[in-house]
Image (tube, helix red, strand yellow):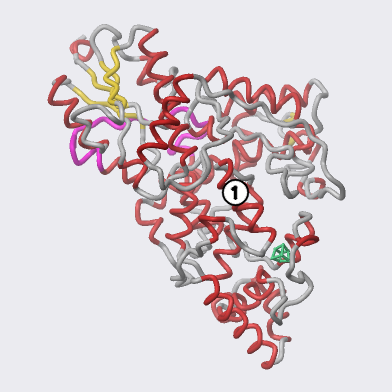
């Protein structure tokens, strides 16, 4: 009973817009208060795409309105409010001074920095587990403890069994755990795929758009075309749209790219999932239902399920297990600056022009442009993992530290020394040529690795292998490619290294 008389202040962060969280459900609507704060620090920590800021602020405003309609007491601090300290810590301090709560509660923040900031102001803050995921951190640790390597595939299989997803008794549906072999299709002609549902900005979103343009006129990215779901109702509509129109084809073409077609069969649900407008379990249930009703093939559904209960939850487990210093890791010793083209999209390299351009246009790109074009380029050029991580954190609507940092510092840049991936995701132009139509209109020659017109991805790929040859020599998964390096004569090695240096100078790395 005493516990029930305590007055609670619940901090609801911008990526915690969940009406059904246990913390929200436990509030006494007449007495407890939800604190939500728009603070400049969160849009200035790294350069932030204007669409990302609009998404967060508009979704927060809609969520606060829904809470008020449901009779919750909400202390909502707008960006332009007088007295706004423009930091989460500052706003928590002000709220505590004003409301004098008996306890302060927050769901586990998705960013170690934010958790530190809140704890600094309120050391006794109660940090509650985030139950919106399908795997608790305790379950992840129980799986990970004692393993020499954390392999996503094994985690994923265990989660399929634990959640009984796409299972046929104890065996995976269809007899296989994954259908990767069927899921590497490419397009040979212009794909004709129905365009995804676009949420129309309402007056709240339009007001936030004006605010962001005024406050951050220099922010990267374009505002025009903003169409992200900012409410749960819109997010549910986006989920239905994906399941109905693009799930069938998702797995088959999940790695393909095509100029001017950023979405293809992809879901674009990550921002809604990461803001907690959608739950991973309901996305997986909807996909599984489509399979059971014969509306989507097993390989397509399995590819989607793997992303949600496999990769997404695996990455989250790694984030909390590895701790706050993970983002600073730089095992390959890469110190290069981020080339200017990441902010402009201006380059002769067609693949990067399209992939970066699409991010500047819409604050999004699917996993292959992220991993195999943009991230790959930063890796083989030798950009600092922290510089490219900051870019990813600011430029995507679905970016939150827990998901971005292990994906970039670990998976994409191999800067964690192999916690997330056992070998670096380094690739030459050959991979991009196979998976897209970019090279057909590129002035560089994807078949060449030396000379002024050689594809820069080839030049940097071989330069990367030459530079790190000794480091990767003991990695069995690298044996084949390193053998190819050993076959290069010293003249060709020199030519590759010289051309890579010249390109680095041109790029300003
Ligand atoms: Fe990219 Fe090289 Fe292909 Fe040009 S040739 S689009 S730089 S991979």
Which of these two is toward me, 264 or 489? 264
Does 91 sit left or right of 100 as displayed? Answer: right
- Location of the N terminus by quadrant is top left
Quadrant in which ligand 1 is drawn = bottom right
Q: Is residue 102 magenta?
A: no
Residue 277 placed where, x, y %? 50, 25
Label 1: how many residues lie within 10 Å, few (<14), some (14-19) or many (20+)?
some
Which residue ends up furthest to the right in the rendered image? 189
Which of these two is toward me, 496 or 479? 496
Which residues make up the magenta segment?
Answer: 117-139
From the viewer's perspective, is residue 410 above or below residue 59?
below
From the viewer's perspective, is residue 69 above or below residue 82?
above
Which of these two is toward me, 347 or 180? 347
From the viewer's perspective, is residue 482 above or below residue 120?
below
SS at mark 1 in the image = helix
Does 418 sit left or right of 73 as displayed? Answer: right
Q: Is residue 133 magenta?
A: yes
Does 477 sit left or right of 233 as displayed? Answer: right
Residue at 40% across, 22% down = 61
From the viewer's perspective, is residue 477 above or below residue 369?
below
């Amino acid at each position: 009973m005493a516990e029930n008389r305590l007055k609670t202040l619940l901090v609801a962060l911008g990526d915690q817009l969940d009406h059904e969280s246990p913390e929200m459900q436990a509030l006494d609507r007449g007495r407890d208060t939800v604190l939500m704060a728009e603070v400049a620090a969160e849009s200035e920590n790294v350069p932030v795409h204007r669409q990302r800021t609009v998404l967060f602020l508009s979704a927060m405003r809609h969520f606060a309105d829904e809470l008020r309609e449901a009779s919750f007491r909400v202390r909502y601090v707008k960006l332009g409010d007088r007295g706004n300290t423009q930091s989460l810590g500052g706003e928590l301090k002000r709220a505590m001074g004003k409301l004098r709560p008996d306890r302060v509660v927050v769901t586990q923040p998705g960013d170690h920095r934010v958790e530190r900031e809140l704890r600094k102001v309120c050391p006794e803050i109660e940090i509650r587990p985030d139950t919106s995921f399908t795997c608790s951190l305790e379950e992840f640790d129980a799986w990970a403890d004692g393993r020499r390597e954390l392999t996503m595939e094994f985690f994923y299989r265990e989660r399929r069994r634990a959640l009984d997803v796409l299972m046929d008794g104890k065996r995976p549906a269809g007899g296989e755990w994954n259908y990767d072999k069927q899921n590497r299709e490419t397009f040979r002609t212009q794909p004709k795929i129905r365009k995804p549902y676009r949420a129309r900005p309402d007056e709240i979103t339009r007001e936030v758009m004006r605010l962001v343009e005024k406050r951050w006129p220099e922010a990267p990215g374009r505002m025009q075309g903003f169409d992200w779901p900012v409410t749960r109702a819109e997010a549910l509509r986006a989920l239905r749209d994906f399941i109905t129109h693009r799930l069938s084809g998702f797995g088959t073409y999940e790695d393909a790219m095509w100029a001017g077609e950023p979405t293809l069969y992809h879901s674009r649900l990550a921002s809604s999932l990461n803001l907690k407008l959608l739950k991973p379990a309901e996305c997986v249930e909807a996909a599984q239902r489509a399979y059971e009703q014969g509306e989507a093939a097993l390989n397509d559904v399995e590819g989607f399920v793997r992303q949600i209960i496999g990769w997404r939850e695996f990455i989250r487990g790694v984030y909390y297990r590895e701790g706050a210093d993970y983002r600073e890791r730089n095992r390959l010793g890469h110190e290069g600056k981020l080339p200017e083209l990441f902010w402009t999209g201006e380059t002769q390299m067609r693949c990067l022009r399209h992939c970066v351009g699409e991010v500047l246009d819409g604050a999004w790109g699917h996993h292959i442009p992220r991993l195999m074009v943009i991230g790959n380029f930063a890796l083989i050029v030798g950009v600092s993992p922290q510089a490219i991580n900051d870019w990813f954190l600011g430029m995507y609507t679905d970016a939150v530290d827990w998901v971005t940092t292990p994906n970039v510092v670990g998976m994409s840049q191999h800067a964690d020394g192999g916690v997330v991936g056992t070998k670096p995701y380094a690739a030459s132009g050959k991979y991009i040529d196979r998976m897209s139509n970019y090279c057909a209109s590129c002035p560089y020659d994807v078949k060449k690795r030396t000379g002024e017109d050689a594809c820069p991805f080839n030049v940097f790929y071989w330069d990367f292998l030459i530079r790190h040859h000794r480091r990767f020599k003991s990695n069995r998964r690298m044996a084949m490619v390193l053998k190819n390096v050993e076959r290069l004569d010293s003249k060709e090695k020199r030519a590759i290294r010289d051309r890579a240096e010249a390109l680095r100078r041109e790029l300003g790395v």
